Amino acid sequence: MSVPLLRWGLVLLVCLLAPVGFAQDVKKAQKAKAKAPRLVRIHGGHRLHRDAAASFERMTAAARESGQSLLVTSAWRSYQQQRYLWRLYRKGKGAKAARPGRSNHNRGLAVDLVVGGELESPTYEWLAGNACRFGFRRTVASEPWHWEYRPRSTPAPGDGEDCLGRPVNVEPEPAPAVVRTDAS
Ligand SMILES: [Zn+2]
């Protein structure tokens, strides 16, 4: 085969294969888009998956009614942000962090809250007793600040109980008025 012919053959081959590669790229991009969480902004400029965000805002409103404010320090994280935190952790310079792609922060389903650092703080106490009503629960034993939205595997509290099974203080119902009827 002569050199020019070979060259044209190569050009032809590239032209034939390029669209295939392009189509694969488009498919990959579509797949990545379908997998990417649909994020919604919550207060404080953080973002969560839209279902988690809606439930989180309801939980925040309920907490506020009980005099507790839920302050977010971290919610959704990009792959790059997670990689950065994970590297810091591996170097012994940062808090515990999951491998990038493995954290529910990457899916917009985890939120880190200011709980005062102690399990006895009023905010933590409120979360422990109420978060399950909104589908949130703790998943990392050593991280009282880390709460995940897992509505399917988070059981709702029993009737008249909070998330820890403690009786909920319900206002006593007023005694029914005695109605006197005159039989005669
Ligand atoms: Zn976290």
Image (cartoon, rainbow, N blue to C red):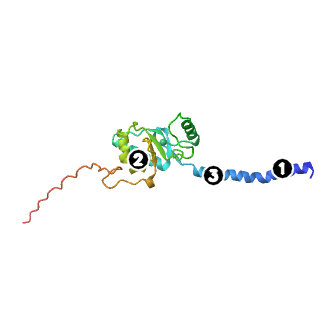
Looking at the image, which is closer to me, 115 or 14?
115
Q: Secondary structure at mark 3?
A: helix
Task: Give the percent coordinates (x, y) of residue 115.
Answer: 40, 38
Mark 1 or 3, nearer chain start: 1
Mark 3 or 2, nearer chain start: 3
Side of 35 relative to 2 (left or right): left
The image's mark for residue 11 is 1
> Residue flagged by tag 2: what amino acid is it?
Arg
Residue on which disc 3 sits: 30
Task: Give the percent coordinates (x, y) of residue 100.
Answer: 57, 43
Q: Which residue shows up at 67% across the image and 51% down it?
A: 26
The image's mark for residue 58 is 2
Q: CA distance from mark 3 to mark 2?
A: 32 Å
Looking at the image, which is closer to me, 58 or 24?
24
Could you classify mark 3 by the number of other residues whose Cα lies within 10 Å: few (under 14), some (14-19), or many (20 or more)?
Answer: few
Task: Give the percent coordinates (x, y) of residue 147.
Answer: 44, 45
Tags 3 and 2 touching, CB below 8 Å: no
Task: Give the percent coordinates (x, y) of residue 110.
Answer: 48, 45
In which quadrant will I find the C terminus? bottom left
Q: Which residue shows up at 44% across the image and 44% down it?
A: 141
Tags 1 and 3 touching, CB below 8 Å: no
Q: CA distance from mark 2 to mark 1?
A: 60 Å
Looking at the image, which is closer to me, 98 or 152?
98
Q: Residue furthest top?
A: 93
Side of 178 relative to 93 (left or right): left
